[in-house]
Each structure stands twice: as C-alpha cells, then as structure tokens.
Amino acid sequence: MTRSSGVFEEWQGCSLEDILGICRDTVEEGDYSAVQRWREGGGRVVGHFQVYFPSELVHAAGMLPVKVCGAPVETRHADSRFGSYLCSILGTSLELALNGTLELDMFVSHPICDAARNLAAIWSRNFDYPCQILYLPQNANSKGSADYLRGEYARLLAELEEIAGRRVETADLARSIDLFNESRALVRRIYEVRRETPWKINAEDSYSLVAIGGFLPVEEHLDLLRTVVPMIEQNERKPEDRIRVVFEGAFCEQPPLDLIRMLGRTCYVVDDDFLIGLRWITEDVETEGDALGNLARAYLEQSSYSPVQHDNRKPKEKMLLDRVRRSKADAVILTAAKMCEPGLEEQVAYVSALDDEMIPYFISEFEQNMSSFGGLELQLETFSENLLFD
C-alpha cells in the first residue's frame, strides 16, 4: 500500500485526551470519511462482515480491508431487502452501502448464522461488484481443517488479485502479516493496561482505538497505536471505587458507544469481547514459510473464542471463566444482541458456569440503534452498589 498522504492525520501532535476524543468522534460519526479519502486517492476497498477475516490478504493485494459491522443508522433502504425479526447488524450494514456511506469494490461475508449466510446473496442483488462467502471451517477439530482453510484463503486471494489487477507475492504476504502482528500486539497491550490499571484507559476509548483500525490502513493505525500506547501507560489518572466487570456478548453486533460510555460511569470494564474478530489472533503469526498456511493455523490454534466458532478445545464457558479470572473481575455483564440466536444460545452455558463458580452476573440485551439507557443504567448502578456494599 503506497499513498502520498494519510487518510487520518488529524490526531497527530495532539495530547492523549484530544487523540482519544478524535478517535471517539470518528468512530461515533460512522461516516467512513477515511475510507472515502482512500478511494479518492485511487485506492480500492474490500468490505468484510463479522466475525473474523484475514485482512492480511487484502492488504497484501494493495487494497484497504474494511470491517463492516453495522452502525446506529435508520434502515430506510435496507428494510425492504430483509424479512422481519432479524438482528440489527444485517440491516444497518447493508444500509451503509445502499445509502452511499460505504463504497466497496468487493464484499465478503461468512455463514456465521442462518441470517448471515444469506447476506452475500442479498448484497450481490443490489451491487455489481463481487460478493463472496468465506467458508471458515465448521469443525475446527478435524485434522484437515488447516489444509481446508488454506484452500479457502487461496481461493479468496485469487479473487482479490483479479480485483487489484496484480499478483500477490510471498514477500507481500509476509510484510502484511508482520504489520498486523504489530498492530494486534499493541491492541493486546491496551487490554493488558485495562486489566491491570483500568483507570488509565476506559472502555469507550479502548473500543474506539480498536474500532478505528477496522477502516484505516494498518500503517496509519500502527502510527496511532505506537504514539498512544506509551501515553496511556504513563497516564496518571487516579483509581476510583468501582467494581470490575467483564462484558460478554458483543462478538458480532456491537453496542452503541453511548452504552459503553454508560458502563464506564458505573464500573471498570476490565475485559470484553468487543470487536473480537479484529483481536481474534492472540499471538504473532509466523512470517516464514507458507503464509496462507500460517494464517490458517493461526485462526485455529492461536485464537480467541466466540459463539460462532465451534471448537471442543475451547469450551465457551471455560474461556469466559478464564477471562474473568485473568482480569480479576468481580462480576460479568452478560448480554446478547436482540434476536441473535448464537449469542442467546450460549448464554445458557455461561449462566450455568457462573452459577457454579458463584460469580455475580447481570443479564441484558442491546441493539445498535438503542438511544435510551436510563433504565439500564439505574439497574446497573443498583447491581454495582449491591456488590460494593455487600
């Protein structure tokens, strides 16, 4: 990826508070102005739906990978393309394309649930650019899963090469993997700071720093993270008397930033599954040898968890308990997006595990278009106070 100038430079030279404010505003506005500037400079854009996507492939082809995860917008155009009783993220994602906010050269979806499996077909009826489905392995425990996934990546890469009009060399992939390795490592460091000293960086700012990486060139996201992570580490905010909670249930549809902000007024969110697809790989991917094979193995062997990946080595309830213990959380905020079948199904196992371990939890639901949080905030304050003063 080469450009004469950046698409997101307004943060440079600013204080920590100003940088975080600019990132919050950019994420909350949801107008993808940075993506538009990329296109105006002659760049091509590949949109990918939740949850995980190998962005390295798009970057290696010289294009911009953009995480498509909906937005708090009215679905004026998309409503006529979908049936009722579906989660919000499907409609709001398509709306961003239909209303011209997000212009793409290719769209890739994943069959993560019954509703999402039809998204690429619906998308393709409304746009003339390629719309593909990336079939991640359903059985992550099969001996053939890594080879199968490598084949899927190779198929997708061939399509990307055709759109980009260039061949992707081994060195291109190695460089892209290296850049994304560093980006993920810096994000992991932000989460370490949140677990250890959550008063230094709140949940909404952490969320914004991760989310903005879903639509910036990785080189620019790295410039931002390299600058801001040391500033966060040196932040001298004072700790407050709040409970420490894990937020679980935002693996696909994302809660509005106002909801995350509301949580931060009541408690310290010390870990979460916000935008878990952008943080899916938990260790550096090998850069030597077969790049596609390395990426496939990393998806299977060096990865987090979510209700849409079925892996007997990673029982979701055990992984949640590990997250709670690692972050020394006092409680769990257990949520699901409205009408999200995978999320709601997983709650049964989560509740049982939390009950067995006598870990307090608060159950709720959300959707991207929520705008009123008064009742929820009051309930959460009551829950928090009961734990603080018990």
Image: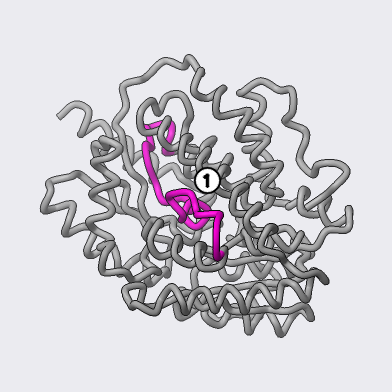
Residue 225 x, y percent position in the rendering: 60, 35
Q: Which residues are magenta?
A: 263-290
Q: Quadrant of residue 240?
A: top left
Q: Is residue 287 visible?
A: yes
Q: Is residue 133 left or right of residue 124?
A: left
Position of the C terminus by quadrant: top left
Q: Nearer the viewer, residue 128 or 193?
A: 193
**Left or right of 372: which side holds 155?**
right
Instruction: Please give the name of the residue rendered at 43% of the width and 34% of the height, measured from the top-left corner.
Output: 264
Q: Residue at x 55, y 29 (%)?
A: 229
Residue 224 in the image, given as x and y percentages of width and height: 66, 35
- Give the residue at mark 1: 184
Observer-nearest of 189 and 203: 189
Vertical placement of residue 303 versus 19, above or below: below
Residue 146 in which image quadrant: bottom left
Which residue is at the front of the view, 294 or 306? 294
Q: Could you tell me residue 280's position as x and y percent? A: 46, 55
Please name the residue shown 58% across and 67% down the image: 49
Asked if 93 appears above or below 229 in the picture, the reply is below
Query: Where is residue 122 drawn, in percent x and y?
Result: 64, 82
